[in-house]
Image: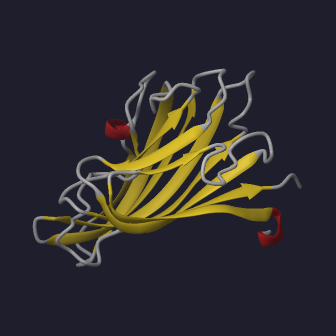
């Protein structure tokens, strides 16, 4: 329930290269205080056409390059009602990769469309563990445009940072260009 969620930090983009949450910096808590952390994405709008929204994790160094293995599936439906599908998306998977994980499918969120944006959430489990890998799950919905067609695209990504070092930073960015606008809220979720 809502009473078990504690708002830790809110970041708002304004032509930002990225939005970054680092444990111990700017009042951010990302340690063993909470077993689960929740990031909420609200109307993330790109500054560049045909891009995706990404995440990466820091595992003790200064780089956001934690090794990740992930899987992805999703669904889309066109505004015209002429196209719809549900399926596995191998193009978004990572296998022991340090690359940014794209959270939305197809990378066709469009800066020129004022109503094109990405909203959703990402759960990060037990990031301070030095015994187990760090699991995460994300679900986002985006308004995408391809040529003249517009789509509602729902994307599910899950995986783990395959490191035993603590995850002490999480960074969100677009696949290219800046984040024009949008808000990310970080919550800690108490034990039940």
**Residue occupying the point 45% across, 29% down:** 63
Quadrant containing the N terminus in the rendered view:
bottom right
Q: Nearer the viewer, residue 189 or 7?
A: 7
* Left or right of 166 in this view: 105: left
Mark yes or no: residue 103 visible. Answer: yes
Q: Residue furthest front?
A: 26
Q: Nearer the viewer, residue 138 or 189?
A: 189
Q: Nearer the viewer, residue 26 or 20?
A: 26
Position above or below: 18 against 94: below
- Image quadrant in which you'd find residue 82: bottom left
* Left or right of 127 in this view: 142: left
The colour scheme used here is secondary structure
* Left or right of 111 in this view: 148: left
Mark yes or no: residue 44 visible. Answer: no
Q: Residue furthest right?
A: 192
Position of residue 16 measured from the top left corner of the image (x, y, whole percent): 34, 58
Position of residue 68 measured from the top left corner of the image (x, y, whole percent): 49, 28
Position of residue 142 measured from the top left corner of the image (x, y, whole percent): 37, 65
**Residue occupying the point 36% across, 43% down:** 89
Position of residue 45 measured from the top left corner of the image (x, y, whole percent): 32, 67
Q: Residue furthest left?
A: 147
**Residue occupying the point 73% across, 55% down:** 188
Position above or below: 12 against 89: below
Position above or below: 169 against 116: above
**Residue occupying the point 70% across, 49% down:** 29
Quadrant containing the C terminus in the rendered view:
bottom right
- Image quadrant in which you'd find residue 22: top right
């Amino acid at each position: 329930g809502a009473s078990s969620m504690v708002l830790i930090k809110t970041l708002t983009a304004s032509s930002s290269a990225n939005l970054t949450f680092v444990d111990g910096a700017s009042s951010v808590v990302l340690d063993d205080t909470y077993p689960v952390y929740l990031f909420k994405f609200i109307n993330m709008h790109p500054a560049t056409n045909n891009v995706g929204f990404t995440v990466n994790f820091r595992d003790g160094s200064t780089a956001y390059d934690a090794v990740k293995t992930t899987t992805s599936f999703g669904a889309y439906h066109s505004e015209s009602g002429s196209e719809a599908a549900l399926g596995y998306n191998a193009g978004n998977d990572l296998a022991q990769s340090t690359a940014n994980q794209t959270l939305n499918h197809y990378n066709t969120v469009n800066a020129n469309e004022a109503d094109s944006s990405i909203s959703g959430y990402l759960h990060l489990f037990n990031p301070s563990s030095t015994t187990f890998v760090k699991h995460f799950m994300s679900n986002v919905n985006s308004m995408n445009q391809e040529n003249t067609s517009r789509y509602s695209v729902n994307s599910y990504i899950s995986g783990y940072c395959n490191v035993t070092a603590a995850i002490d930073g999480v960074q969100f960015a677009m696949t290219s260009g800046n984040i024009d606008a949008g808000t990310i809220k970080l919550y800690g979720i108490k034990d039940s």
